[in-house]
Amino acid sequence: MFRFGLPLLLLVAFSLAGCGERGTLDAARGDAERGRLLVARYHCGHCHAVPGVPAARGLAGPDLASYARRSYIAGRWPNEPARLASWIAEPQALAPDTPMPNLGVSATDARDIVAYLATLR
Ligand code: HEC
């Protein structure tokens, strides 16, 4: 019964390590798992539906499902990691008229949230 225990554990460990690596490459070294927790902590889900964050089911803002495959941020700017991080940290700097509030997200936190959004394919 325990014969498969270790190989299975190693397999899970390796596949988790693989995910982390991909997230890192996708979004300029952000920490995707930390980003997922930050989405909950900043209450982004009050306004957005975000896969992987159970409480995030808000409808006031766009659904962030498959965000890694979106071409544009808010329909206006190319969806690039640095641009997305500045949108999250200070949306009014890009779009003074946007209803998305400035939540005081630090640059580091924004980078990690971008890393998480980059995992949503
Ligand atoms: C009070 C509601 C509210 C909160 C809280 C909020 N947002 Fe938004 N967000 C919006 C709205 C509304 C838009 C659409 C803005 C626009 O199109 O100008 C938006 C747009 C966005 C977009 C671009 C969506 C697209 O379709 O390209 C992203 C990404 C985003 N928000 C991420 C976040 C993250 C991450 C957080 C938490 C740190 C957050 N938002 C918190 C309301 C909110």
Image (spheres, rainbow, N blue to C red):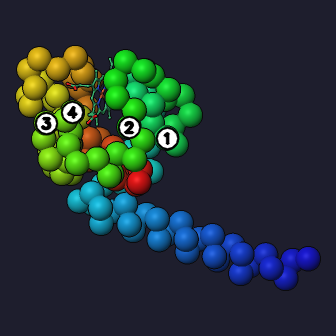
Mark 1 or 4: in front is 4
Viewer-side residue, 91 vs 77: 77
Which residue is tagged 1? 51
Whole-angstrom CA distance, mark 1 to mark 4, is 18 Å
Viewer-side residue, 51 vs 18: 51
Q: Which image quadrant shows ligand 1? A: top left
Do callouts 2 and 3 mark residues in contact (Cβ within 8 Å)? Answer: no
Disc 4 residue crowd, few under 14, some 14–19, many 20+, Cα 10 Å = some
Residue 71 in the image, given as x and y percentages of width and height: 22, 48
Whole-angstrom CA distance, mark 3 to mark 1, is 23 Å
Q: Earlier in the sequence, mark 1 or mark 4?
A: 1
Is the CB of the residue bearing disc 3 within 8 angstroms of ligand 1?
A: yes
Q: Earlier in the sequence, mark 1 or mark 2?
A: 1
Q: Quadrant of residue 74?
A: top left
Q: In the displayed structure, does residue 35 sit left or right of residue 75?
A: right
Which residue is tagged 3? 76
Q: Amino acid at mark 1?
A: Pro
Do callouts 1 and 2 mark residues in contact (Cβ within 8 Å)? Answer: yes
Q: Earlier in the sequence, mark 3 or mark 1?
A: 1
Is the CB of the residue bearing disc 2 within 8 angstroms of ligand 1?
A: yes
Residue 121 in the image, given as x and y percentages of width and height: 41, 54
Q: Quadrant of residue 15?
A: bottom right
Whole-angstrom CA distance, mark 1 to mark 2, is 7 Å
Q: Earlier in the sequence, mark 2 or mark 4?
A: 2
Residue 57 in the image, given as x and y percentages of width and height: 50, 26
Which residue is at 59% across, 71% downward?
13
User: Mark 3 falls on what kind of element?
Assistant: loop
Which residue is tagged 2? 64
